[in-house]
Image (cartoon, grey):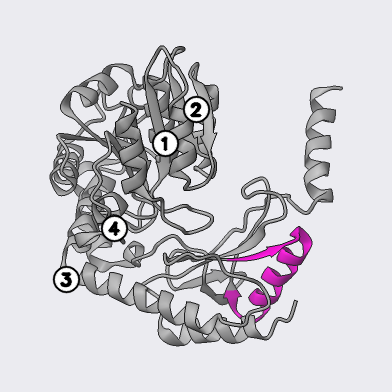
Amino acid sequence: MSWQQRIAKAVAERQETNTLRQRQPLAQGAGRWLVRDDRRYLNFSSNDYLGLSQHPRVIQAWQQGAEHYGVGSGGSGHVTGYHQAHQHLEEQLADWLGYDRALLFISGFAANQAVIAALAGREDRIVADRLSHASLLEASALSPAQLRRFQHNDSQHLSRLLAAPLAGQQLVVTEGVFSMDGDSAPLADIARVTREANGWLMVDDAHGIGVDGVNGRGSCQSQGVKPELLIVTFGKAFGLSGAAVLCSQTVADYFLQFARHLIYSTAMPPAQAVALQAALGVIQSDDGQQRREKLAQHVAQFRLGASGLAYPLTGSQSAIQPLVVGENSRTLQLADRLREQGCWVTAIRPPTVPAGTARLRLTLTAAHEPQDIAHLLEVLHGERG
């Protein structure tokens, strides 16, 4: 089979199973409203949980950063791309989250890949929650280490896997809040089991940072856990993009020598780092607390009003409220009908989620208003499967 035949066959298979991914060009799409083809929709697919992508203070900071630094970094951070704005942001993140060091990465995907690639050796074992993000599972599978997956949020199964004999070291990998189910990991139990096995814990808190914990410090702080490796990303509650790895001084020095995704990538624009400092300031402020409280009110309103829907919700208490439909074509049809009623919702299908669990991944944000949630519920209650 030729390259072209192989590619065409793979795309055709996705089309036949209603799992073909397609992008939608938007005129506007990060805030409360999404605009496409001159029509405005209430946006229930954004990860901008606190609405900071539209915050005047954050926007102004990026503009001021661009005026001072320009719009690019100029190279890898190991050459000329590391600016004072990056250094100041790293220092602020480390102080806020209680670590020696923070290292900035261009994306959460790159940060996860870099950490696992730099750490995992042939005699080591990675034990990951089976529903961990694709960046974590892919990096683990591609590493020379042995990969084992524990049942979702099952610390007892994790303990059994960690007890198997091993010559090297063990790295336990999980998310703080899971991106497709919206549920939280039992981090205190996982940390205890990992510690008893003399392993290290790595937590990707992309969906918890900025929202959970005191002053938005995230899932780990809220459960009294300090993993050896904490990954925070800026594409969700921070309202921007990029990521950081929080770790000890020695581990940071190691990554600066051996993390190829850090060494060989152009650094994020320093203007972006200035905007991220502003976003962090908002998260830590009374404004940030009010936004977290507003988001929690929206979640409570939605879950109370969702009683009796044709399709079940998961047990999520986070901004992520998945409505599990099951069948791919039905999920797509339901998403289309919601859009007809002015609600932009994305259908999530395999392989992103397990087969038979296609869903509408509804996300609520502090940018919404109570009447937005009420309208979404009204439309959903109009669907009877």
Q: Report whether residue 277 is seen.
A: yes
Q: Does the magenta-highlighted stretch encompass residue 340?
A: yes
Question: Alpha carbon of mark 1 to alpha carbon of mark 4: how far?
Answer: 21 Å
Q: Secondary structure at mark 2?
A: helix
The magenta-colored residue range is: 323-343
From the top left corner, tell me how far across and down residue 32 is, in percent.
44, 73
Name which residue type carries label 1: Val
From the top left corner, tell me how far across and down residue 197 is, in percent.
34, 28
From the viewer's side, name the closer residue of 281 and 142: 142
Circle 2 sits on which residue? Answer: 140
From the viewer's side, name the closer residue of 18 and 106: 18
Q: Secondary structure at mark 3?
A: helix
Decide: is 305 above or below 359: below
Circle 1 sits on which residue? Answer: 173
Name which residue type carries label 4: Gly
Q: Estimate how packed mark 4 is, as few (under 14), some (14 to 19) or many (20 or more) residues with alpha carbons within 10 Å.
A: many
Name which residue type carries label 2: Ser
From the top left corner, tell me how far across and down residue 115 is, in percent.
37, 28
Circle 3 sits on which residue? Answer: 286
Name which residue type carries label 3: Asp
User: Can you tell which mark lies on residue 210?
Assistant: 4
Q: Secondary structure at mark 1?
A: strand
Decide: is 41 above or below 160: below
Q: Nearer the viewer, mark 1 or mark 4?
A: 1
**Marks 3 and 1, the one that precedes in the sequence:** 1
